[in-house]
Amino acid sequence: MEERKRHFPTFVLWLLVFAVSMLFLLVRCSSEVFIKGPPALSAAAEGVPVNWVMAPNVWNGQVREPEDLFLRYGREIGIPAQTAAGEAITIKLDGDVPDRAVLVEYALSPDGQSAFGGQQLLSEYPFYFDRRTGTITLPEPGEHPVRGYMLRCYWGENNCDYGMVVQILLE
């Protein structure tokens, strides 16, 4: 009696390939959805580092109390960065580029407090990153030489605020 060779069923092979592919996809997607934390940010004006403070608002489902970034900046860093009008501040993210970012500019007093009791909004506009790098060009100081900049970045449901205080000097 002749023994027949049993071939490995093709559908089992396809099922195995499908299962491994789905497992890879599941791991890849879940790592993007649950980002460990907001990416670090660095900023520099003409090569000189500019300090930032960070406050996650909503991260992986955890909602945090809103925080005044400029008061925090005053407590933790103190002295505003001094830069000349017209200089570009280059901002670099160490992680994924956000889906959307908004830059908000406020008038402040030198200690990081609002210049008028409440925060005075000077402007708000979309901010764009080109391969993890973006720039802000500082305006003339005018009536408000000390400005607070808040960059709010969104990664899906996650969002985080980055804030800095800059004293704009005449050229």
Image (cartoon, rainbow, N blue to C red):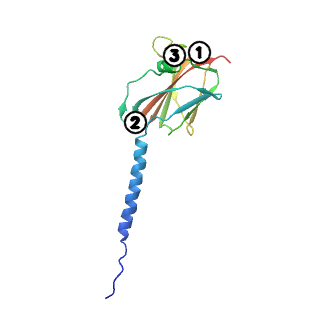
Label placed on residue 112: 3
Residue under label 1: 145
Q: Secondary structure at mark 1?
A: loop
Q: Secondary structure at mark 2?
A: loop
Identity, as a three-letter code, of the amino acid under mark 1: Pro
Q: How far, Cα to Cα, is label 2 from label 1?
A: 35 Å
**Label located before the other in sequence (3 or 2):** 3
Quarter of the figure with residue 47: top right
Where is residue 121 drawn, in percent x and y? 49, 18
Q: How far, Cα to Cα, is label 3 from label 1?
A: 12 Å
- The residue drawn where x is 58% and y is 12% is 143
| 49 over 116 or under it: above or below | below
- The residue drawn where x is 53% and y is 37% is 94
Residue under label 2: 157
Q: Nearer the viewer, mark 3 or mark 2?
A: 3
Identity, as a three-letter code, of the amino acid under mark 3: Gly
Q: Nearer the viewer, mark 3 or mark 1?
A: 3
Q: Nearer the viewer, residue 63 or 117?
A: 63
Identity, as a three-letter code, of the amino acid under mark 2: Glu
Where is residue 135 drawn, in percent x and y? 59, 31
Q: Nearer the viewer, residue 103 or 44?
A: 44
| Residue furthest to the left | 1
Q: Secondary structure at mark 3?
A: loop
Label placed on residue 77: none
